[in-house]
Image (cartoon, rainbow, N blue to C red):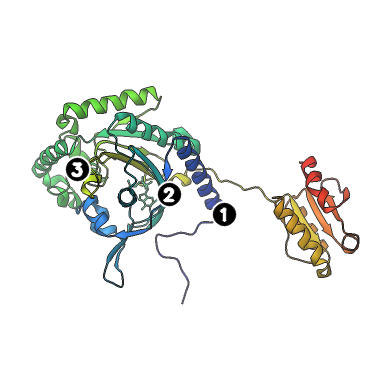
Amino acid sequence: MKLRSVRGTHDLYGHDINKYNRIYNIVSKHALLNNFIELQTPIFEFTDLFSKPLGDQSDVVLKEMYTFKDRNEDLLTLRPEYTTPMIRAAITNNLLEELPLKIYGLGPMFRRERPQKGRYRQFNQINFEVFGSSDFIIDLELISLANEILNSIIPSDKYTLNINSLGDYKNLKNYKESLSKYFNQNKTKLSIESKIKIDKNPIRILDSKNDDDIMVSKNAPKIYEFLSDECKIHYENIKKGLELYNIDYAENSNLVRGLDYYCSTVFEFKTKDLGSQDTLIGGGRYDGLIGSLGGPNIPGIGWAAGVERISMLMEEINVDEPRIHIAISDEKFKNHLIKIINYFRKNEIIFFWNYKYNLKKSLSKANFKNADFVVIIGENEFNNNFYTLKQLSTGNQFELDIDNIKKFLNDKF
Ligand code: AMP
């Protein structure tokens, strides 16, 4: 059998894992600063949790979910997104008593999409969600937090914020009806894919990347004509708030997001540097979702960031090499070696040893890696219970008792 990884999955190591760790550290720091609590959910849930709320006509539900039967016939799905599991967890763990609930999580998602640059079948998302407030201040807090996090990771000229309002569910229903009517009148000009969506999911035609669809969409009815006064005010407040936060944005009336549960404010951070998979972060309001999943009838809003896509825009990150090496001349002195290894570990001193009992090889490795000091263990050191520290830049050697090594190194660095 030839070993291979599953299509659309990838292993993480080297620069990639360094970037991931950097992203996760930055996210955790911002979460803490902004009072978001971490919530990790299992990677699989009952299929029902996803199929209805995401929309039976959404691409995710139609063709992308990894669904399987458990041995006792339960239908389970690897989570394709994080919002519904977060809501499930908030309800089942009684976390909705004090509102708003501000939570975040990070981890792998699974979608059986056609793999390409920036699109994988297992990918990692960062999610921030707020349950229980419809105040536009919360929309702004989340959008500006996404901006802040992105900006701490990649230069701000690499991405732009797009915003739109989808109105409430009633506005959206009227809008969809009007869109279906318009697209039916222009059916012959649409792509085959979009023709299928006319009656069941017409708003998805608006974000089609097909040139013919784009032409037809240009003259389609606009959502703004359907917004209630309340939704208009909410949206105006978002725009004014973004100016106060000093965040540039573009209004994009074709920004509709892929899943059925969205309403009101929707937004995406997009980049021009990744080809067609250009959305780094996507989010929006889902004011009816928590109630429809069996929770209280409270509003919600959140966003999801794609870790792979963000990391593709980052510079490579080198992790510092150990500055202290160990070189031992013979296996006979192993006990002396164990003592220094234990000492280094307890004192949190990072070191490297090449697992060879050969002074020459270990010293040449240390030279090659540009180490600062080599701890030498030979017969003299073993018999007289001390360690020789050789400074590679000068060739100077220092004979030290083990207890003095930490102070010695601290003084040198
Ligand atoms: P979505 O839940 O589709 O709005 O996705 C949110 C973010 O997750 C996107 O903006 C992407 O950055 C990322 N993402 C979604 N699907 C994939 C995928 N198949 N591969 C890699 N990243 C993805």
Mark 1 packing: few (<14 Cα in 10 Å), some, or many (20+)?
Answer: few
Judging by the rendered image, the residue that carries numbered circle 1 is 14
Judging by the rendered image, the residue that carries numbered circle 3 is 203
User: Does dot 1 land on a helix, a strand or a loop?
Assistant: helix
Q: Are marks 3 and 1 in contact (CB under 8 Å)?
A: no
Amino acid type at circle 3 is Ile
Real-space Cα separation, disc 2 to disc 3, in angstroms: 29 Å
Real-space Cα separation, disc 1 to disc 2, in angstroms: 20 Å
Q: Residue at x 32, y 30 (%)?
A: 250
Give percent across and percent down for residue 254: 24, 37
Residue 231 seen in the current view: yes
Quadrant of residue 189 within the rendered picture: top left
Q: Considering only order in the chain, which callout, 1 or 3, is on the residue closer to the N terminus?
A: 1
Give percent across and percent down for residue 312: 47, 46
Would residue 36 appear left or right of 301 to someone viewing this image?
right
Give percent across and percent down for residue 133: 29, 35
Residue at disc 1, CB closer than 8 Å to ligand 1 = no
**Of the pair 234 and 386, the residue shown nearer to us:** 386
Amino acid type at circle 2 is Leu
Quadrant of residue 159 within the rendered picture: top left
Q: Residue at x 77, y 57 (%)?
A: 340
Quadrant of residue 336 within the rendered picture: bottom right
The tag on residue 106 is: 2
Q: Considering only order in the chain, which callout, 2 or 1, is on the residue closer to the N terminus?
A: 1
Residue 362 seen in the current view: no
Amino acid type at circle 1 is Gly
Would residue 141 appear left or right of 199 to someone viewing this image?
right
